[in-house]
Amino acid sequence: MASTLQPASKSLASTKKTSRRLSEQASSVRFWRDKTPTGVESADDWKLWAAHLGSRQAPKSLMNLCLSEELPLRWGISREELSGQAAELLSLAQKLDARSPDKSRPSKKKTEQLLSKWQKGTSSQPQSIDFALECLAVAHALPRIADLVKPELWWKLLDALWQIVQSSADWRIDVELPPEEGLAQQMLSGELPLTLAHLLPEMRPVHKLRAAAHEALSDGLAELLNGDGLVRGTHLAVQRPLLACWTRCRALSQSHKKNAWNQKAEKQYQCLVTHAIALSSPTGRPLLGWPHDAPWTPEFLQNAVRLGGDAADRAAARFTFSKKMTSLLPKKGTKLVPETSDHCEWSGLAYLRTDWERTEPTVVVDYSTPDLRLEVWAGPQRLISGTWAFETALDGKRLEPIGSWDEVCWFSDEDVDYLEISIDLTGGAKLERQILLARDETFLLLSDNVVGTEGGEISHSYRLPIDSEVAFEPAKETREGLLVAGKTVARVLPLALPEWRVDPRTGELTSSEGQLELSQKLPGRNLSCPLLIDLRKQRARKECTWRQLAVAESLEIQPHDVAVGYRAQCGKDQWLVYRSLEKPANRSVLGQNISLDCLVARFLAPEGEVDELLEIEGGEEE
């Protein structure tokens, strides 16, 4: 990030009391609070002040407050992502904590060199996550280095942190800013002043920083979350570090029986804990996060659930993660769990789960930007992760996306989770994208529907990025294929394509360079491109088949650009999928009269009846 710390705003700079260095204010009678030892009246009374810092029993360190043997500043951020200086300062802060497993005392020379170098560079450091972590590490180390650094350096470090807090005071949180900047703002404008107020309560100006921290943290939770604790899809990469920041602040404030933020923000924080568990893979890593995101650690998970969660969150975590990861959670609790699925149009985000069990499928969709991202897990194995890209053309001319995705429909019940979104295309056309996860049936239906063109030859293709551990094995004579990771995990059926390869019409399902690609080409005004992924691995090697069905209206067979129907079978299980591409009308397919926009159902053979999983009429759920 290119921005750098700026001097304090005009209103702050014009107030001498606020802008003066703390080392200069220390001689004032009003500087020290009653908790200060007798005899400490200025920055020059170093021996008394250093002795006090070395002997006091309170306040407790952050590691003590969190009952952790790892420095909580490391939560949610991969060590590989840290700069060398940030890693060194975090290591120093951890070594100095009495709770640290590493009992070796840092050398005076190396400590002074490291901290002096950091202090001299603070005025030009970027407002980055690394710099925010460095500031917090120095703040936590400050009360424990009185015997390791010269008095002049100690006060320079405190003055530097004070100036950073003042410079960050008018840095307002905004969800439209880059996500990394929002995280840095919360750490520098909220967590840093709260940390200083906790660690140095003897200093009146520092103690008063709680009010500014309270405001910054309340604003941050309100601005970055949707009202029910869900981040925007654009902020998934920093969701876990944000939760870590706010959990540390919650721990610091709870030790003083104070609120870190207002009541509305508290509700958001509690809901965020639930979402953070739901937006995690069985390995504990964030879904659709950074490539090197750190997984939950037992200490981080324990504190998040302890400070913001409830018994249902504990149960969800135990179902989702390994025993090692949940080892610090209370062993007794309820079997009740939160809702498995949620979405938000403001967030541009949806997660779909069949259950909380780590063996069950999970799907996450981030449609907050035109480059929609998708992640699919079949139990403990990731199948797909990355951008779900597409290309559309009419008579060879590209139809480009315009604007952003709009939510058309969200529906969730005991049978399915269903999300439908759309994006405008040039030429007046539209792409409607469907994502359906069937709970008991255990399949995922992904479908792109190009609608509203002027008519002509429509070609459409989309690519799904396959996990590096997964390979696509196409069948030799038919167009389905298997997703294999050592053993078969799932099967993929291109419903709109002819089953047998000897029929070369309409398109292909192929894989190349880690991408599974479905391509179709047909004349007409509309085109449907569905893909059914059978996620029940026990069925994957059993016989399968599918057919494109005739759709009739007023006893006349309708062309494929008016409505489509498909029948798919995997093992003994059969399903019916119907989609109207024009205005819904009374039509018949597979012996069923349908006046719906969309129908997905179990097909019960040999009775010929259907058991509806999803019915959509006019874009709204029934």
Image (spheres, helix red, strand yellow):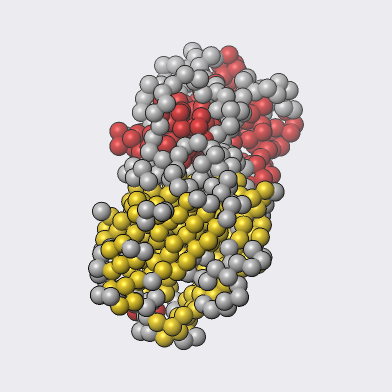
Decide: is 588 above or below 201. Answer: below
Decide: is 444 above or below 29. Answer: below
Q: Position of residue 323 (x, y in %)?
A: 58, 28
Quarter containing the N terminus:
bottom right
Does residue 272 appear in this view?
Answer: no
Pick the front one: 200 or 16: 200
- Count of marks, rendered view: 0
Pick the front one: 457 or 344: 457
Decide: is 88 above or below 620. Answer: above
Pick the front one: 366 or 71: 366
Seen at 32% across and 73% down, the residue is: 552
Does residue 611 appear in this view?
Answer: yes
Q: Position of residue 423 (x, y in %)?
A: 38, 68
Seen at 30% across and 58% down, the residue is: 616
Pick the front one: 257 or 57: 257
Q: Residue furthest front?
A: 606
- Is 449 placed left or right of 518 in the picture? left
Q: Position of residue 52 (x, y in %)?
A: 56, 16
Seen at 39% across and 79% down, the residue is: 426
- Is 124 placed left or right of 496 in the picture? right
Seen at 64% across and 59% down, the residue is: 472
Q: Position of residue 104 (x, y in %)?
A: 73, 23
